[in-house]
Image (tube, grey):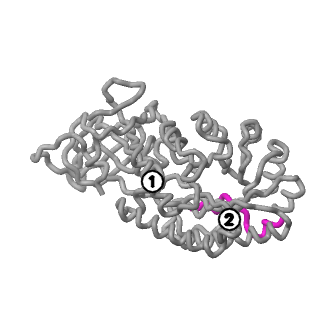
Amino acid sequence: MTITSSNNSRPQEEAFFVLDRARLRDQIRLWYQHLPTIMPFYAIKCNPEPMILEELARYGDGPGGVGFDCASAGEFLPVLATGKVLPSQIIYAHTVKIPHHLRKARELGIHKMTLDSVDEIEKIAENHPDARIVLRIRVEDRESRIRLGVKFGADEGNWRELMEAMIRYGLPLEGISFHVGSGCASGNPFSQAISLARRAFDLAWDLGLHPNLLDIGGGFPGEVLFGMGRAKGLAQFSDIAQTIRSALSRYFPETLGIRVIAEPGQFLVSGSCALVTRVLGRRMCHGPEGPTMHYHLDDGACGSFPAVLEDELPCEPIILSKLSEDRPIHRSILWGPTCTTEDLILEGAFLPEMRTGDWVFWRAMGAYTSARASTFNGFHIPPYFSYKNVIGDWWSKG
């Protein structure tokens, strides 16, 4: 197995991620194939790996370009550090911001930002008076795996108060944004949200404001959605995109001159990254359910797997080591490396017998994995390497 890295030529002995840049580029092409008029602003929270940022920064700000959705200075500084991204390609998409981060954004020329409260208007007016406001509205998100409306978004009854406060503080309304929640299962919530956003635009125009941006947020399915394989997951995206195009044509025809952007995260990177873990040890246990082989891997629920486990997405271990036909099949439990029993990856699977030192491959691990990993018990977060024609057969499985 050949893994390339610009800063490490030693054989890899512990868990690591592999980034397939070609698949990341494929996702950008797929996005523009289905949503040709909507510029994606990559949601950095999904995976801030520098190699991903460098790859996406190459697309620039023109047609077919890529922007960046950042929630803090800790996210927009690495983006600008690529040297290829303009401040105008960043939307500061957190409705409650840290004051000194606002001042840093002003210093760097990042002006586009979201909010959903009068308190935030006052904070922005004090710390970033050059800001251009994108009002985040609350929309229906019951069809999504993770609902965000319980925490973010202004109710329709508060819009007028917020817009009048913007006028009072001299902050221009750049546009309207929403988020239908993570892992949206259909296009219907997008259609309803776009209709609601039009009402927000109408109110703003009535008040003499001049919004010209619609941000339809994220929630787009990644490579694996509710147990579906790659083909079905992409078909789901195609259906959602068709609904979005239809809703935009109805509520925001081109004659209005409204620019539309979105904030995809897992759609771009979920299937672009894989994780390779190693078996640290094993033992056979005999219990009520019969013999069960317990394996301890060098990454787990306290590391790169928390979002995968919490969202109940499928975890399919693929054993990379060459298996002989006579390896028995055992009921198996896969543990992470830490000292807590909560560090459980997979239970009850029937797997070929593995040995200490074997490698286990996990596909579609690019979203909310390393970004949410901890170093509990002193175990490090796995590094990233570039893909070089070594794991294609396993990668494309499913």
Question: Where on the picture, by quarter, is residue 246?
Answer: bottom right
Residue 309, visible in the rendered structure: no
Residue at image coords 69%, 63%: 258
Q: Is residue 53 left or right of residue 351?
A: right
Which residue is the site of mark 2? 138
Position of residue 386 measured from the top left corner of the image (x, y, whole percent): 39, 37
- Residue 309 colored in magenta in the image: no
Dominant secondary structure, magenta:
loop
Which residue is the site of mark 1? 27
Magenta span? 147-161
Residue lying furthest left: 326
Q: Is residue 61 left or right of residue 338?
A: right
Residue at image coords 80%, 66%: 204
Residue at image coords 20%, 50%: 330
Q: Secondary structure at mark 2?
A: loop
Amino acid carrying label 2: it is Arg
Compute the Cα span from label 2 to label 1: 28 Å
Position of residue 108 measured from the top left corner of the image (x, y, whole percent): 72, 37
- Residue 151 colored in magenta in the image: yes
